[in-house]
Amino acid sequence: MADLSSMGEDAVIAKLVQGIPLAEHVQVGPGDDCAVIDIASPKGLQLLKTDTIVENVHFLRTAEPFSIGWKAAARVVSDFAAMGGQPDSLVVALAVPKELPFTFLSAIYEGIYACAEAYHFSIVGGETSSSKEIILTLSGTGYATQPILRSGAKPGDSIYLTGQIGGSIAGKHLTFQPRVQEAQWLCTHLPPNAMMDLSDGLAKDLPRLAEQSKVGFDIDLTQLPCTPGCSPTQALSDGEDYELLFTTQHPLDEHLHAQWRARFPNTPLTKIGTVTRHKKTQLEGGWEHFSNSSD
Amino acid sequence: MADLSSMGEDAVIAKLVQGIPLAEHVQVGPGDDCAVIDIASPKGLQLLKTDTIVENVHFLRTAEPFSIGWKAAARVVSDFAAMGGQPDSLVVALAVPKELPFTFLSAIYEGIYACAEAYHFSIVGGETSSSKEIILTLSGTGYATQPILRSGAKPGDSIYLTGQIGGSIAGKHLTFQPRVQEAQWLCTHLPPNAMMDLSDGLAKDLPRLAEQSKVGFDIDLTQLPCTPGCSPTQALSDGEDYELLFTTQHPLDEHLHAQWRARFPNTPLTKIGTVTRHKKTQLEGGWEHFSNSSD
């Protein structure tokens, strides 16, 4: 029987969640950046998300423990942002080796709390258990008035990216700022037809968006907003960019671009291609959890 | 500086969550079975919980993978029950070694889905990552109209237990039925002043309840509802019972006991002691996550 590394993460997940029953008030189940649940509240639709980071896969033990905590929390916040939403309440599950000094754990929590303060959510619970590696799972709720899904892209849409991509391993993957305000701005001024955040690299994530929208794409590799020093190949493949990838029916005109620049002067907004009817859904590269070696 | 095994889990958690800011709509933060959040919904107050099980701590790889999934989900459901609540939507974070056969993962998920069907909740999302050990974190939301906290016990309250305790390692820890219906019944017919579920053993958990209620307790060890074949010492210490521990101002009279027996013929309800004013909060035994050896 197939082991996980021969199947790939997407196939594994797809098979696991195939045909599972969902209650009627669950509007979006597995497969998007967050689940979407109608909780009959004026606060909006509720988003629910869980995300794990693992030692030697997502960080090394030599990393600043503060930034390990920041990263774990910011990844979840980035998923709320990717739906056009905001985080509300998160819980922390931390599995750590017993011999770890308390100061290390405490600094991880400081990173989580710093993210909570910066992005206005509460840490409402947590638990710890012992394990061989440090494994940190953050989960919880957020809200969105009108969630932007991965499945809404239409042929003819322009494809955009916030920020710059590639080379995240040099440091950004531990210290990135999730694009909550940027996503809010986009929802107010456009809104996007489809949106997601880039975690496994554009080459892996854009085909996911296209697949869910049942469309193809045409990307101009010369237009990729590469991090200075990065090649287009790295920009496609490196992963952990935590930038927003979105499509919109009307490309942003110069007036709207100027508004964006005034509001987010340090974050470029770049058109990288067009959504097509034909289902070209392949790009070379991107991070594959069960196949890429992390040792 | 102290490492985790010299501090103990409760001290670790207490220090980590000390003085953290919570939004106003968070009614209960870290420290109870679940967080309680006012979401302005007619569905009730929202409960939020995360819980992790780790290979070689909570299960062995030789266990039925179905029951590993069942256990991970049922533990969270048990925490909702402990608040007098019901589960609604859960997400799954699964970290597994790459060489694991897909069928193993798939059977874990079948156990999770079986629990979802039995206890009427939805699995709305999940993710997988690679790790050395199998680590399964389930998180999500539930509802309670009037959550029962650990902190509500009053001097003079009778202390009760559902079911039998001790010897869970023989199998119950993998196959237990969380006491959701039982907790609902208690909330309707009493309600309890304080309640929690037993996960680390009565000797560890009752002092936690007493501590949070700022009371003591007087337990009659001869009255403990021990699993057949278990000594009172095992009943105190073994852990993973997932029974309800609660206190109530009025001890159940024979009429109410008869009603309970008619509704739950296989689950005894036993008075084991009394809440006292004096703060005796020690019992010998119970599971200590960072000190007990699991290797």
Image: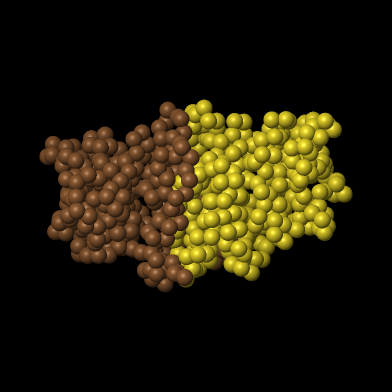
Chain colours: A brown, B yellow
- Residue A84: x percent and y percent? 33, 40
Q: How many numbered discs, if any?
A: 0
Viewer-nearest residue: B51 or B109: B109
A196 with respect to A266 (left or right): right
Seen at 45% across and 64% down, the residue is: B130
Viewer-nearest residue: B117 or A267: B117
Seen at 81% across and 52% down, the residue is: B226
Viewer-nearest residue: B103 or B51: B103
Q: Residue furthest left?
A: A254
Q: Say if residue A15 shows up in the picture.
A: yes
- Residue A171: x percent and y percent? 33, 60
Check the image and report above or below for B99 versus B38: below
Which quarter of the image is occupied by the N terminus of chain B? bottom right
Seen at 71% across and 52% down, the residue is: B241
Which quarter of the image is occupied by the C terminus of chain B? bottom right
A17 with respect to A201 (left or right): right
Q: Residue furthest right?
A: B222
B196 with respect to A146 (left or right): right
Check the image and report above or below for B186 versus B60: above
Check the image and report above or below for A153 versus B100: above
Check the image and report above or below for B86 versus B238: above
- Residue B127: x percent and y percent? 44, 55
Q: Residue furthest front?
A: A19
Q: Say if residue A195 shows up in the picture.
A: no
Seen at 87% across and 49% down, the residue is: B222
- Residue B289: x percent and y percent? 64, 58
